[in-house]
Image: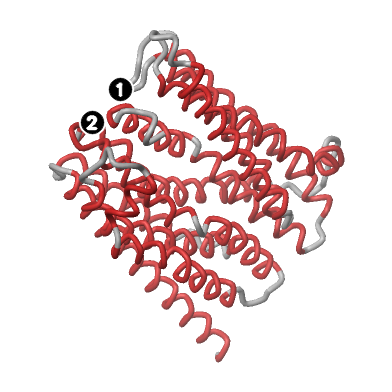
């Protein structure tokens, strides 16, 4: 898309994906919290409780996904929103529903340790999003001058999510059938709801930290938004490469915590893996920014090589931060949410009121990510010292 779209439209597409992530944060919360609770119930052999949880929260997810999606769709009938046209807003409404529902089913797969199906679903989503988007942008839409090419990319994103719904439901059908009429005398609804709300703060904070700048850039620095969007795309390789590790870490940590075992070895292995993979990509961006920019996003963005080095460091820090988030959530230590919430307020305020160009935005994102990284390490060290002291006592 960086090659098919002009820089201004590519910046809008990047903002759309940033908005898609932010609007589907409820779904991300659902996935992670669902995975944590399902892994806990599964590890303890609490099948009846698991079935009740699935039945109860499936109904709630349909409501949570349906009402805001309908509201966004109604807005699309009235007016455009910011850089998004009315058709784009309507597509956002569809993707909102699909994203939230899919992440519940993905959370079930993650919590049950069905990582083959989980990975296959993500791959299917990516292939369909790319295939449909490129087909519409490059072949179907060009003959019709009244159709904006960027909308083809939007439709591709929605199609990918639709495929994700179908792919994730296939292995879950036995569980969904067992949960259909499940009843249990122990009501865990209040504790589950409390955990979901706390998880919302954590994952909303993390998503805002990693995607808000992409949404703000077209409004704050329109002349440089294309180069900034290209930088974000390149940095996503650093940020997304360890995503599967975070999914496994959350499940392993939750399961170990439920069984009274020490999950720290999974944390250390995950941190080492991310440093060894995303770290190599970051180093490559620092050494050869011009060559890699041409390979990844093309030659339309001459300012991107100057931005990608420091921005990739921020992406690496955020990739490591995602592991800390998975670890703390898996252990039920939700205090990290307060740090993330404070960091979000500070970062957005700086991006909106202080940043005057693309490089200033990069410096802000990098600084906030490094401060949060240090805070996560200190939080872990204090908690580890407390656990060690309790064992000795």
- Point 16% across, 44% down: residue: 355
Outermost bottom residue: 392
User: Residue 220, how many percent across, how many down?
Assistant: 20, 35
Q: Which mark is residue 31?
A: none
- Point 46% across, 24% down: residue: 138
- Point 59% across, 72% down: residue: 266
Q: Quadrant of the N terminus?
A: top left
User: Residue 42, how many percent across, how many down?
Assistant: 77, 58
User: Residue 199, how many percent across, how many down?
Assistant: 51, 50
**Disc with the residue nearer the chain's start (2 vs 1):** 1
| Residue 324 falls left or right of residue 341 | right
Examine the image and state in which quarter residue 28 appears.
Answer: top right
Q: Which mark is residue 219?
A: 2
Q: Is residue 276 above or below residue 212?
A: below
Q: Give whichever of 127, 82 is nearer the camera.
A: 127
| Disc 1 target residue | 82
């Amino acid at each position: 898309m960086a090659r098919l779209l002009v820089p201004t439209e590519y910046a809008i597409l990047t903002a759309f994906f940033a908005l898609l992530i932010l609007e589907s944060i409820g779904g991300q919360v659902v996935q992670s919290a669902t995975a944590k609770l399902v892994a806990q119930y599964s590890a303890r052999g609490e099948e009846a409780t698991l079935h009740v949880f699935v039945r109860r929260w499936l109904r709630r997810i349909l409501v949570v996904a349906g009402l805001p999606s309908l509201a966004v769709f109604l807005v699309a009938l009235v007016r455009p929103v910011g850089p998004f046209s009315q058709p784009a807003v309507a597509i956002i409404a569809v993707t909102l529903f699909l994203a939230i529902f899919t992440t519940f089913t993905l959370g079930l797969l993650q919590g049950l340790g069905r990582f083959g199906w989980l990975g296959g679903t993500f791959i299917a989503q990516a292939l369909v999003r790319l295939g449909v988007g490129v087909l519409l942008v490059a072949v179907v839409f060009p003959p019709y001058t009244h159709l904006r090419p960027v909308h083809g990319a939007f439709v591709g994103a929605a199609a990918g999510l639709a495929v994700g719904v179908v792919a994730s439901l296939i292995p879950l059908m036995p569980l969904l059938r067992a949960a259909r009429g499940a009843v249990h005398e122990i009501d865990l609804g209040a504790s589950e709801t409390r955990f979901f709300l706390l998880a919302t703060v954590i994952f909303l904070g993390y998503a805002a930290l990693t995607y808000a700048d992409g949404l703000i850039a077209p409004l704050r620095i329109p002349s440089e938004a294309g180069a900034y969007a290209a930088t974000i795309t390149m940095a996503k390789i650093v940020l997304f490469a360890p995503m599967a590790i975070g999914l496994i870490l959350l499940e392993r940590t939750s399961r170990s915590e439920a069984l009274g075992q020490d999950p720290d070895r999974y944390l250390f292995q995950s941190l080492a893996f991310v440093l060894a993979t995303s770290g190599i990509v970051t180093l490559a961006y620092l050494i050869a920014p011009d060559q890699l920019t041409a390979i990844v996003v093309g030659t339309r963005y001459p300012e991107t090589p100057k931005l990608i080095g420091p921005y990739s460091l921020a992406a690496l820090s955020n990739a490591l931060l995602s592991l800390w988030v998975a670890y703390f959530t898996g252990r039920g230590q939700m205090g990290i949410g307060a740090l993330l919430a404070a960091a979000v307020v500070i970062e957005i305020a700086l991006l909106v009121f202080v940043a005057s160009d693309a490089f200033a935005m990069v410096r802000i994102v990098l600084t906030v990510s490094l401060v949060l990284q240090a805070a996560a390490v200190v939080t872990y060290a204090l908690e580890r010292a407390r656990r060690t002291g309790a064992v000795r006592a």
